[in-house]
Image (cartoon, grey):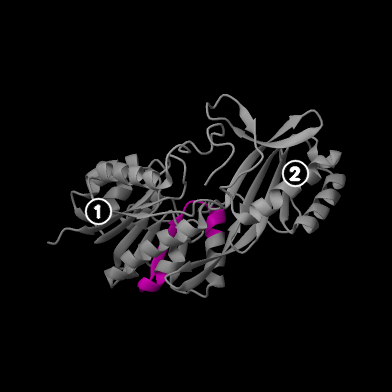
Amino acid sequence: MQCKHFGFCGACNLYNLDYEKQLQEKSKKVSELIEYENITIFDSPKQNYRARAEFRIWHDGDECSYAMTNMDKNGVIKIQECKMVLKPIINRMWKLLEIINSSEILKRKLFGVEFLSSTLDDVLVTMLYHKKLDDDWIAQAKELEKILKVKIIGRSRGQKLVLSKEYIAEELNVDNSKYRYIQYDGGFTQPNPKVNEKMISWAKEKASSVGYGDLLESYCGLGNFTLPLSSCFDKVLATEVSKKSIYNALENCKINDIHNISFIRLSSEEMSEALSGDREFNRLKDINLKEFNFSCVLVDPPRAGLDSDTINLISKIEYIIYISCNPQTLARDLETLTTTHNILDGAVFDQFPYTNHIESGVFLKRFSK
């Protein structure tokens, strides 16, 4: 990918490295941290790979521009192109800016625009304001929806206006099977659809090698991994702390006609308390935990990694699939997990090309007795 803003825009801080060199460096870093050499690298499309994007709106007199934080993190640069975003965003973002600049109502007090898109050409645009949005704004924004064939949300302090729908539809191809997802505004979604497909396929391959029992999943989100991996197990218990994400996951389960998953709103700490029998939860009143025979657990924690209780819990399960967005905390957690488990496989998933961010995965098996 070549971009006229390389070296100036802070979004791509590895702009000066050849893409293959970036992959090698990321793989080397993960290998050294987790002390495992046979890392599989899953690359990304070199451009048009990002399904989410957030741009500041820069006002220069009567003219609005998209802007990003600069490389030195001490100011902004106005941008004229962004090759990392999916084509559905590119096909709309510049026309959107043109219409905004032609309307005093749309541009006044506008300070940001967020895009969420899918490979199905479904796009959600959130417009952020320092003003209360009124009927005049709604009328013009609805026209904008029609012209651009998008869904628009307007936000200001204490105000959220959904003009049509607050979600997009996505379809992922995993192991030659198609899975459909609804993705809501404000919910966590994987940023790179093509790498996400590779990441789920890798996890499903590991899950299918287990060959028996039930799956436990923590940090399940909207069911990104849960739905495809459910076919590898008798039953699945998937937990997530966000009520909205659980609602989203249940919707996605229904859309895909999957019936062996129980989605429960529990934090990772609460999950540990429930499964160890230390605490009872009304949310689990319809779930008999004793019926589950967990042969495998999948965890996909935030950057802080796993808490000690969760590590203690999953260390008792034969197989572990650990998806990580922070190799440092992954390495820290593996110091404990490798006292009970061997690493069978490791992978790097390049969700964020041209940046230092690293997504990785590790597959472990408990020592034979």
| Disc 2, SS | helix
Q: Amino acid at mark 2?
A: Leu
* First along the sequence among labels 1 and 2: 1
**As displayed, is residue 109 above or below residue 227?**
above
Q: Quadrant of the C terminus?
A: bottom left
**As displayed, is residue 190 above or below residue 178?**
above
Q: In the picture provided, is 65 more to the left or to the right than 1? A: right
From the image, tell me which residue sits under label 2.
Answer: 97
Farthest residue to the right: give it.
136
Magenta residue span:
230-247
Q: Residue at x 54, y 56 (%)?
A: 245
Farthest residue to the left: give it.
369
Residue 107 on image: x %, y %: 79, 38
**As displayed, is residue 115 above or below residue 214?**
above
| Disc 1, SS | loop
Q: In the picture provided, is 214 more to the left or to the right than 103? A: left
Residue 38 bears which disc, if any?
1
**As displayed, is residue 328 above or below residue 42?**
above
| Residue 282 visible in the displayed image | no
Mark 1, Cα crowd under 10 Å, few <14 / some 14-19 / many 20+, is few
- Quadrant location of residue 228? bottom left
Judge by depth and name the residue closer to the eye, 233 or 62. Answer: 62
> Decide: marks 1, 2 in contact (CB < 8 A)?
no
**Is 18 a magenta residue?**
no
Residue 330 bears which disc, if any?
none
Residue 174 on image: x %, y %: 45, 68
Q: CA distance from mark 1 to mark 2?
A: 47 Å
**Is 236 a magenta residue?**
yes
- Quadrant location of residue 81? top right
Q: Residue at x 72, y 50 (%)?
A: 153
Residue 192 on image: x %, y %: 51, 53
Residue 36 on image: x %, y %: 23, 49
